[in-house]
Image: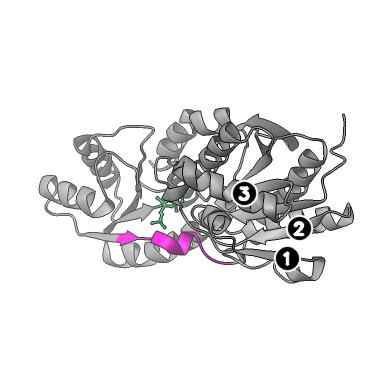
Amino acid sequence: MEYMKNLKRIGVLTSGGDAPGMNAAIRAVVRTAVYHNIEVVGIRRGFQGLIEKQFMSLQSQSVSRTVQLGGTLLKSSRCPRFREKQYRKIAYDNLREANIDALVVIGGDGSFRGAEDFLEDFKDYHIVGVPGTIDNDIYGTDYTIGFDTAINTAVSAVDKIKDTADSHNMIFFVEVMGRDAGFIALYTSISEGAEAMMIPEVPTKIEQLCSYLQTERRQNKTSGVVIVSEGDENGSASEIAEKVKKILPNYETRVTTLGHIQRGGSPSCRDRVLASLLGNGAVEALRKGISGVMIGQINNEIVYTPFREATTRHNEINKYWYEIAHILSL
Ligand code: F6P
């Protein structure tokens, strides 16, 4: 493998929704680069910062005591302007002017799409991606940075909700995040023994949901939790609860939307380790002259997936796990 000899300075940015562990990934990028005598420039606010030249020099001590912090010290944004070629050109000129030879983009599939478009325009440039999103929906890695923390947050919240559900014989509809993917809902449902889950990957009619609930009732269950993924085709948890109430008017229903608490907080040990390995892997890939790929981890091995694949395919839930969740909730 030929090493990129002229790699003197790299940029790092976080883009899209923040995810716990992004700081650990930034730290790993900085420390690995410093180890190899490569300078690091932090780009604030994702692609927006590239366009607006929001650059800051990062040293080893800049990332001290950040591994345990949620959010992203570089800040993040979703940047619609980056879809336009004229803004990508400004970004490219800014990078060249600052002598930034290559870039690490930490984010989700939207961020990798931006990186892919940029590399289409400027084929001489080098970018690698690191998957950071709580949704776990990115193809090319077993887990994304932030997912483990998010499911632990969701599970501890539902533990609390179940106390009230049990005390008052209520059915709670708990909405979890995951724009197009049911991973958070699936893991939370299995962990909680939820009565049912509503996820985009397994379309479930409201009547079907009601018959699950009635079966549970017949077996002397007096309370329960239904986990609703925000991407479910039947609508939000409130909409689903309303539809259920029309069919089963005797049910005492309540709705909780967990929302952005799932994105915050100190990253779990697993997320810190994953972020550290992928951040390190990103710099090692750039040193080898590799570009246009996302760095992932599959079966504990670092793997490279072309942006094209990472953005057009999706991590798929294991349908068998869905069935198991149902069996165990009976
Ligand atoms: O992609 C991460 C995510 O948290 C999704 O689960 C959710 O749909 C979306 O971001 C929310 O985005 P925003 O914070 O921009 O409303």
Which is more toward the observer, 288 or 67? 288
In this rendering, which labeled residue sits more in front, label 3 or label 2? 3
Which is more toward the observer, 211 or 87? 87
Residue that numbered label 1 is attached to: 57
Which is more toward the observer, 236 or 128? 128
> How far is mark 1 from mark 3, CA to CA?
18 Å
Question: Ligand 1 near label 3 (Cβ, under 8 Å)?
Answer: no
Q: Secondary structure at mark 3?
A: helix
Amino acid type, label 2: Val
Taking the magenta stretch, the answer to whether it contains residue 263 is yes
Amino acid type, label 3: Asp
Q: Is disc 3 in contact with disc 2, using a CB cutoff of under 8 Å?
A: no
Name which of mark 3 and mark 2 comes first in the sequence. Answer: 2
> How far is mark 2 from mark 1, CA to CA?
6 Å
Res. 314 visible in picture: no
Residue at image coords 79%, 66%: 59
> How far is mark 3 from mark 2, CA to CA?
18 Å
Q: Which quadrant would residue 223 be assigned to in this image?
A: bottom left
Amino acid type, label 1: Ser
Taking the magenta stretch, the answer to whether it contains residue 185 is no
Q: Is residue 95 left or right of residue 33?
A: left
In the rendered structure, find residue 93 and report the number of the disc placed on it. Answer: 3
Q: Which quadrant would residue 118 be assigned to in this image?
A: top right
Q: Is residue 174 left or right of residue 84?
A: left
Residue that numbered label 2 is attached to: 40
Q: Is disc 2 in contact with disc 1, using a CB cutoff of under 8 Å?
A: yes
Magenta segment, which residues? Answer: 256-265
